[in-house]
């Protein structure tokens, strides 16, 4: 254990997916800069992240993002004590850009360097000095803790016994929650990313039929692909029904002009009420399973608090319901710190440096890096 100075200042980079981010965090808690350049617009037209496009854009954005972060330090580079970057999990090409930039900076300036697990970083957003827990406390969480990490690529429950000591309690067997939100949004004709679109559509969608829940009894694992397929079948049935009820475009044209060739009938768009009710039922199903398993895990392992993390932690229904059901305080980062950013990478790095961990120059990217065992 190394006692770090209160003003120990870390420059961290995050490029695991489609956000190019740089942050400066002091003492593992105080955010001096948190700059995020999103590539969302670029990937929107493809309905998902295109790895090649992401890597190229990271290369273009990294330098301006780092410069913008550094401007918050009066002494510039001289005020930076250490450097960190995400080295996995994520897209290999995208990870390489941030990891190599961070290693080059650290080597050139003779600074300590550490590679950070992106999943661990999401959890450490809860140590940043900006949010109270559901009981109003601003203190650092105390171990043992149960963390629910829900993002576009991951869904897992972990037991945290101490800094760096994790036990994986369960994870998804198929789709990640965020991925399910994105796929269901696409089925319903909502935008990308699907999470915020579904959350918005679900407002006022109560009252329809419910959707199944995959409980996977006696396990903390999750499964969301069956739920996604159930939504797909419902949407197809709805479209078939409206196609048989309404005259097709071809029929309407034929009635007017008998001799013209019939164009193929188009798939009818899903009606607004159906989209709202299905978005609501989908969100309820996901939230029910996530909350039930997280509350059970916290109780079984005597957790002092529950930490919510990852992009889907931005979901207000999930937050509300977890707080309502949990018997211990629930902590979640502010909306901006739930989705990918580098401040969370700096927070995780701080506790690594404190336990004396540093990475060597040959640290490589690990696209499938896991959390715990
Ligand atoms: O953690 P993150 O920014 O990136 C990954 O590491 O994957 O998570 C992105 C995911 C996307 O799937 C997005 O749809 C989801 O988080 N998301 C939400 C909400 N905001 C973002 N899901 C549900 N409700 C939201 N409000
Ligand atoms: Zn993430």
Image (cartoon, rainbow, N blue to C red):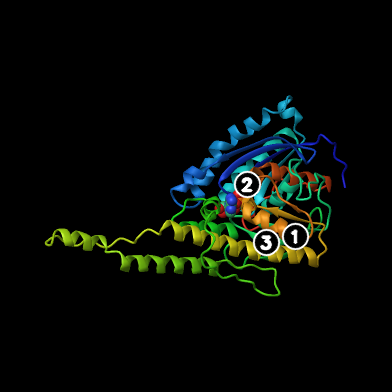
Reply above or below: 349 against 226.
Answer: above
Give residue 342's position: percent from left, percent from top: 67, 42
Q: Secondary structure at mark 2?
A: loop
Q: CA distance from mark 2 to mark 3?
A: 17 Å
**Residue 116 x/y as whole percent:** 71, 49
Name the residue located 47 percent from the left edge and 51 percent from the top edge.
Answer: 191
Asked whether the residues under the numbered discs 3 and 1 touch, taking CB atoms below 8 Å apart as contact, a structural biologist would say: no
Q: Which mark lies nearer to you, 3 or 1?
A: 1
State the separation of the CA atoms marked 3 and 1.
17 Å
- Looking at the picture, tell me which residue is in the foreground, 273 or 38: 273
Please tell me how crowded label 1 is: few (under 14), some (14-19), or many (20+) other residues with Cα within 10 Å: some
The location of residue 133, given as percent across then percent down, is: 76, 49
In this view, the residue farthest toward the left is: 259
Q: Is residue 115 left or right of residue 228?
A: right
Which of the two residues, 160 or 287, is positioned nearer the viewer here? Answer: 287
Q: Residue at x 44, y 51 (%)?
A: 46
Which numbered disc, 2 or 1, marks the residue that appears first in the sequence? 1
Q: Which mark is residue 326?
A: 1
Residue sitting farthest toward the bottom: 217
Q: How many marks?
A: 3
Give the numbered dot on residue 160. none
Q: Are marks 2 and 1 in contact (CB under 8 Å)?
A: no
Q: Quadrant of residue 307?
A: bottom right
Question: What residue is shown with label 3?
Answer: 156
Callout 3 crowding tier (Cα within 10 Å): few <14, some 14–19, many ≥20: many
| Label 3 CB sits under 8 Å from any ligand 1 atom | no
Q: Nearer the viewer, residue 48 or 117?
A: 48
- Report the residue at 74% width, 25% height from top: 75
- Where is mark 2, residue-wise? 340
Q: Kindly indicate the quadrant of the structure image that contains residue 157.
A: bottom right
3D distance between C-alphas at marks 2 and 1: 26 Å
Q: Is residue 266 above or below residue 62?
A: below
């Amino acid at each position: 254990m190394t006692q770090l100075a209160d003003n120990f200042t870390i420059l961290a980079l995050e490029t695991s997916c489609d956000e190019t981010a740089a942050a400066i965090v002091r003492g593992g808690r105080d955010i001096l800069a948190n700059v995020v350049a999103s590539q969302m617009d670029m990937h929107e037209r493809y309905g998902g992240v295109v790895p090649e496009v992401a890597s190229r854009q990271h290369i273009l954005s990294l330098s301006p993002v780092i410069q913008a972060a550094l401007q918050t330090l009066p002494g510039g580079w001289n005020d930076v004590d250490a450097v960190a970057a995400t080295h996995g999990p994520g897209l290999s090409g995208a990870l390489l850009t941030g990891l190599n930039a961070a290693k080059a900076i650290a080597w050139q300036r003779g600074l300590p360097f550490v590679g950070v697990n992106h999943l661990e970083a999401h959890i450490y957003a809860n140590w940043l000095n900006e949010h109270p827990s559901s009981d109003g406390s601003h203190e650092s969480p105390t171990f043992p803790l149960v963390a629910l990490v829900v993002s576009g690529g991951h869904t897992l429950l972990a037991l945290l016994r101490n800094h760096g000591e994790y036990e994986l309690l369960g994870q998804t067997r198929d789709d990640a929650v965020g991925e399910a939100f994105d796929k269901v949004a696409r089925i319903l004709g909502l935008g990308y990313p699907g999470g915020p679109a579904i959350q918005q559509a679900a407002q006022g969608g109560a009252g329809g039929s419910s959707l199944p829940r995959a409980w996977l009894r006696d396990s903390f694992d999750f499964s969301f692909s069956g739920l996604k397929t159930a939504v797909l079948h419902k949407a197809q049935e709805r479209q078939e029904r409206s196609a048989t009820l309404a005259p097709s475009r071809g029929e309407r044209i034929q009635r007017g002009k008998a001799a013209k060739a019939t164009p193929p009938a188009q798939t009818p768009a899903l009606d607004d009420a159906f989209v709202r009710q299905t978005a609501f039922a989908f969100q309820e199903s996901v939230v029910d399973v996530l909350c039930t398993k997280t509350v059970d895990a916290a109780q079984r392992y005597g957790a002092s608090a529950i930490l919510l993390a990852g992009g889907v932690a931005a979901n207000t229904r999930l937050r509300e319901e977890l707080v309502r059901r949990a018997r211990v305080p629930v902590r979640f980062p502010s909306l901006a710190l739930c989705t990918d950013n580098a401040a969370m990478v700096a927070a995780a790095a701080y506790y690594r440096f404190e336990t004396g961990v540093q990475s060597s120059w040959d640290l490589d990217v690990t696209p499938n890096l896991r959390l715990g065992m």
